[in-house]
Image: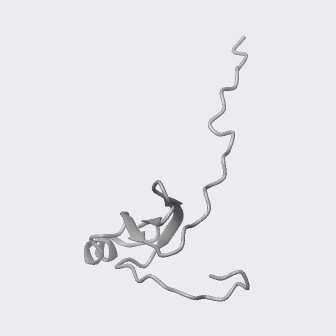
Amino acid sequence: MNSKGETIAQIELPCGIITNCCFGGDDLRTLFVTTGTLSMSAAEKAANPLACGLFAAQMDIPGLPGWKTGWPRQVKIDQS
């Protein structure tokens, strides 16, 4: 998408359930995409052997780095 929110490119994947994506690599030009199978029946999983996978695509324009979170955070639990 461009800065106006318009779609300027699309990547076709051999899976129907896209779960997440992020940019990586030294130059942030590799788009990593994960796929899932949560709502698929056994027959759908068998028909989609690449589902629940990780895909990577090289992009012409670099993405933005991911957000840093505080998770997992060590929390002291009082077990008395």
Colour convention: one colour
Residue 24 in the image, given as x and y percentages of width and height: 49, 57
**Towards the viewer: 30 or 42:** 30
* Residue 66 percent across, percent down from the top left: 61, 55
Return the residue found at the far top: 80
Residue positioned 61% across, 57% down in the render: 65
- Residue positioned 73% across, 16% down in the render: 78
**Could you tell me which residue is drawn at 66 percent across and 82 percent down?**
2
Question: Compared with residue 64, is residue 43 higher up or lower down, i.e. above or below?
Answer: below
Exactly how many numbered labels are in the figure? 0
Q: Quadrant of residue 40?
A: bottom left
Q: Is residue 42 left or right of residue 22?
A: left
On the rendered image, what quadrant is the C terminus found in?
A: top right
Q: Nearer the viewer, residue 21 or 64?
A: 64
Q: Where is residue 62, by image quadrant?
A: bottom right
Picture coordinates of residue 16, whole percent (x, y): 42, 79
Residue at 51% x, 66% y is 19
- Position of the N terminus, as image quadrant, is bottom right
Horizontal and vertical percent position of residue 64: 62, 62
Q: Is residue 9 above or below residue 37?
A: below
